Image: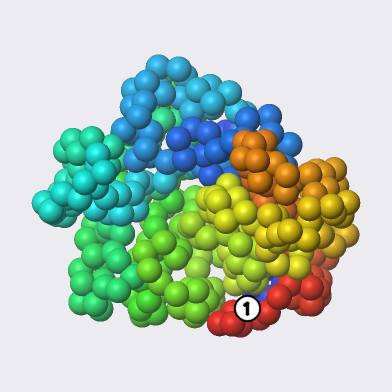
Amino acid sequence: MFSFSLHHQDGFARAGTLVTPHGIIETPIFMPVGTQATVKWITADQVLSTGAQIMLSNTYHLYLRPGAEVVEHFGWLHSFMDIPIPILTDSGGFQVFSLGQTAWGGFKNKEKLVKITEDGVEFRSYRDGSKHFFTPERVMDIQSSLGADIIMAFDECAPGCSSESYARAAMERTHRWALRSYSQWKINEWIRKEAWLYPQTLFPIIQWVVYNHLREESCHFLSKLDTTGIAIWGLSVGESKEDMYRILDTLAPILPREKPRYLMWVGTPEDVVEWIARGIDMFDCVLPTRLWRHWEVFSSFGNVKITNEKYKLSHEHIPMIPWFETNISRRYSLGYLRHLMNVGESLGWTLLSLHNMEYLITLAKEARKSILQGQFQSFREEFWKHYPSIDGIPH
């Protein structure tokens, strides 16, 4: 019930179709993030109104609350959230390594909060300090209980500042964990088939921070696994954006052509365009629903500071070039959006989040059209003609 078809390639940019049990996904695609089984401030119907074809949820957070068994009790994530589109869950690896170092109860605990062994990872909950242990097998079981369509292999999320020797050790351990994840996924698939449940597909994850040769080595190793797709870790562990572009330039020629490529946790307008140019098919980021904290919103001409005094009496809308307007940018004035943000109305957070999500989804959709027409480079040039130049981004 899973298949990927590549329809056209323009340079490294690709247009394809990924078939899943809960629907067909046209790539390239931006995927909204529903960390705790909800996209923050957004209802399921509003998510669908943006044109979203797939969304994410987070294994770590759902494991802690409400618990995978609770989600399973309600008929898995699709029924729990009442959303019909495909769902992807991450492995929880990033949260284990990042939030495991976070204090609970407002106090910094000096105890080492994450312990890595060959078997798995012991960590403390960022909520109450309780101890937990994730193995590759356990993470596969949790994701089976959550019921996503696409699940991630468990990995060690090495910090961006890791030495080459540590990065290699973490890579080799994650390769062993990927094989264990694969074996447990196959067992769970047999169990799901016997229970007449829809199947899941597994994506392993390429990491290894800023070292090109390690990324290449990991790509070759993980591409050999019999999985539908492959994932690439992004910028969440300390790498610079310049490093990420360099790494993707290295990986673009060697990533498996027949598999969808998912770049994790990156998502600004310039990212969407430039990742697509480097052969990425799927990407996600929480930024669209977090940018409002800085009183900002995406536009075709760079980010707009909504609370700027000059917008107080403005009848103008969020500035967008033709074909990229969103439901929000067409309807609401900057003056009204500024008012909502200034008075702390949650509707403002919702409207800005909806606009940001729809813009990235539309950007990917228009990029797809240009690839199918063999016009992606013109599309890319047109984007950069309006968007402010950003240092460190080769385009």
Residue 106 in which image quadrant: top left
Front residue of 394 and 254: 394
Note whether 226 is above or below 19 in the view shown. Answer: below
Q: Which residue is mark 1?
A: 390
Quarter holding the N terminus is: top right
At 30% from the left edge and 54% from the top edge, which residue is drawn?
98
Q: Going 39% across and 58% down the picture, which residue do you hit?
A: 205
Report x, y in % for residue 232.
45, 62
Q: Is residue 365 visible?
A: no
Residue visible at 50% across and 74% down in the picture: 241
Residue 169 spot, x, y in % from top left: 20, 68
Task: For mark 1, give the secondary structure.
Answer: loop
Can you see residue 91? yes
Is 124 left or right of 70, judged from the image as shown? left
User: Image quadrant for the C terminus?
Assistant: bottom right
Answer with left or right where residue 4 lies relative to residue 59: right
Residue 195: give x, y in percent of width and height.
Answer: 40, 20
